[in-house]
Amino acid sequence: MDDLGVAIGLVLVIEGLVWALAPRFGRRLLEAASETPESTLRLAGILAVTAGVLLVWLIRG
C-alpha cells in the first residue's frame, strides 16, 4: 500500500510541475486533448496503462 501512495504522490508532482513551470503548455495540451477523437484518447490510455504495468513489472520483478 505504501508503493501506491508513493506512485500517486509522484503523479501529483509531475502534474503539478507542468502547471507550475509551463501553464501555457498545459493549456495547449488540454486544448489538443479536447480536439482529439475519443477512440484515439482511449487507445493512448490503454497504451499508457500497458507501459506502466510493464515498467512496474520489470522494476519490481
Image (cartoon, rainbow, N blue to C red):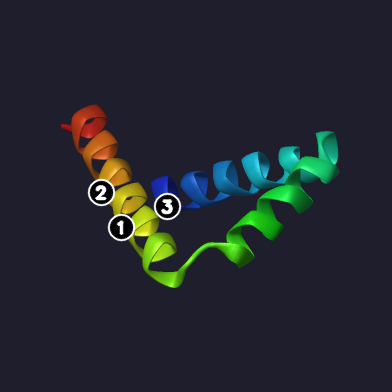
Q: Earlier in the sequence, mark 1 or mark 3?
A: 3
The residue at which mark 3 appears reads as: 4
- Determine which quarter of the picture holds residue 56: top left
Residue furthest toward the top? Answer: 59
Image location of residue 26, percent across then percent down: 74, 47
Q: Are marks 2 and 3 in contact (CB under 8 Å)?
A: no
Question: What amino acid type is highlighted by mark number 1?
Answer: Ile
Residue 50: give its label: 2
**What residue would you read off at disc 1?**
46
Q: Is residue 52 above or below residue 61?
A: below
Report how far apart the C-alphas of labels 1 and 2 lie in the structure. Answer: 6 Å
x and y, in percent, of residue 55 in the image: 28, 34
Residue 41's quadrant in the figure? bottom left
Crowd rating for badge 1 (residues with CA inside 10 Å; few <14, some 14–19, many 20+): few
Marks 1/3 in contact by CB < 8 Å: the verdict is no
**Of labels 1 and 3, the one closer to you:** 1
Q: Nearer the viewer, residue 31 or 13?
A: 31
Tell me which corner region of the image, top left, top right, bottom left or bottom right, holds residue 16.
top right
**Split into 4 quadrants, where in the image is the N terminus?**
bottom left
